[in-house]
Amino acid sequence: MPDADNIMQRRHHFYVATAKFLFQHPKYGIVSVRDPIRTSDARQYGLNPILLYGLTVAGLPIRWMTFSSHDSPQPLRQILLSAWSQGEGLRGQPDVLMVSRHLAQSDPALETDLAKIGVVLEIAGPREKSLPASLRSAQEKSRWLSSRSISQSMPADQAIAAFSADALADHIWRARDRRRDLGDRELEDRIEAWLALPIRDPDPSSVTHGGWKAGPWLTSWETSLPPDRERYFSDSGVERRTWLLTGQEPLDEIDEEEDDSDNGYDNAPEIAGNVIACWPNPAKEIAQSIGTPLKALQWFLDEKSSLDQSRRYSLLDMLGVEFDEHLGCYAARGPCVLVANKANALEDVYTDMTGGGDAWPFELVPSKGQADPSWRYVMINPHSRPPSILMVARGDQIADRLDDVLLNFDGIRRVDPALYRDVVSTCAKACQSPRANGPAMRDFSDRHEDQWADCMWLPGEN
């Protein structure tokens, strides 16, 4: 049997970054966050950033991590020597060490020094996916590391050193543990083959204490974060850690029954998101119409950030989303022209508009002449409310599911050609811009008010 060490190349990913989910606090020690926060915002809570250093075996879920104060970065060669000496799962010094372009530029002499001990420094190209994936995984796993050795009374440097010791203990335990059940036999075999390699002792001659140049690349993950929201500290005795959680701190006097309710929950982003998913215009145009960037609108819909009151009101008013005093939450009310883009969103919007299905929607076709070759038009006619119109692209799969999506769907009705032409014209006007939608549909409703009041909403009427 050939020697595994002669046929398996030893490759490590090496990365350094500001920890995304970990901070140090003078009172609480190591603090974890569930929702990432900018370091500038974190400092307002007394949180100091931490640097994460890590190595991952390429292609395998084996990683070694250590940490330092952001203000006291550790020499890269010292980090590597410690990792290759202490990290059993790394199996010592590799053949190839892959790093990012930014890390290589931060220490220009690193490549030459590593070459002296037989390690090739490989700089990841712009299309390289595995190295960033290793860093993302390390960031995610770091916030769940045990902090059992840390006392809140420890000075900052001691707390970080203790946390690093816990990270090393976790690495060693995982490297020695053979009770794996990853659900992937091939991966488990590759892990075993790697761990069967002899440890290659690192050459300490490369170790120098020269510094490296930090830069914005350490916090590149901050660029995609929304504006910060209110947060509070929460101590978890079970997890033996302190969290900085998003939201308002719960009041002690709230009992369990009240705790289980949705009291105070703002469902406006969810409802607005469903309507936007069915709106004739793209989200970018909707954002422009209320004077906000698309990213800010998306953050609002994803409940990651709020909109200022004027833009929020403008958005909800344009979409026909109203606060229902009886239900105590927001609901889609219309009237508007919708497009059948997503079945789930359409079903939710329809349920809102019709009060749970109190309507008999039907498809309009002209009693004489040809129907529109591109679109089908469905009248949504809620009881005692103005109608809305749903446009369904011909040939779209959702067209075959209208019976399932629209409760009480009443099939096809032949209508006066003049009414049909007015429907088509109204939809064309509504699609011109996000703000044209509601007014076009309200004008249509006013023109045909007598029909809705008399019989048009009733099932089976023509």
Image (cartoon, rainbow, N blue to C red):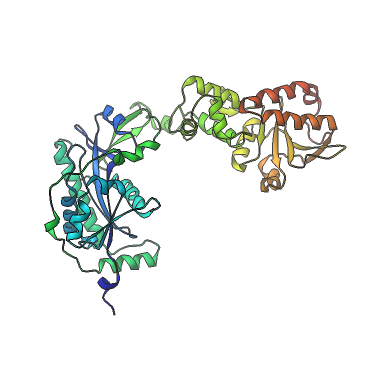
Measured along the vertical axis of the image, is residue 336 above or below residue 222?
A: above
Q: Position of residue 141 (x, y in %)?
A: 31, 48
| Image-based side of 350 in relation to 329, left or right | right
Measured along the vertical axis of the image, is residue 28 above or below residue 87?
A: above
Image quarter of residue 387 = top right
Q: Position of residue 296 (x, y in %)?
A: 46, 30
Q: Residue furthest bottom?
A: 1
Along the line of sight, the residue nearer the viewer: 159 or 68? 68
Measured along the vertical axis of the image, is residue 459 above or below residue 100?
A: above
| Image-based side of 235 in relation to 406, left or right | left
Q: Residue at x 37, y 64 (%)?
A: 187
Image quarter of residue 202 = bottom left
Q: Residue furthest right?
A: 368
Q: Residue at x 48, y 29 (%)?
A: 293
Q: Residue at x 26, y 66 (%)?
A: 195
**Does the rendering let one see residue 120?**
yes
Q: Position of residue 284 (x, y in %)?
A: 54, 33
Q: Position of residue 140 (x, y in %)?
A: 33, 46
Quadrant for the C terminus, please: top right
Measured along the vertical axis of the image, is residue 309 above or below residue 157?
A: above
**Does the rendering let one see residue 149?**
no
| Image-based side of 74 in relation to 129, left or right | left
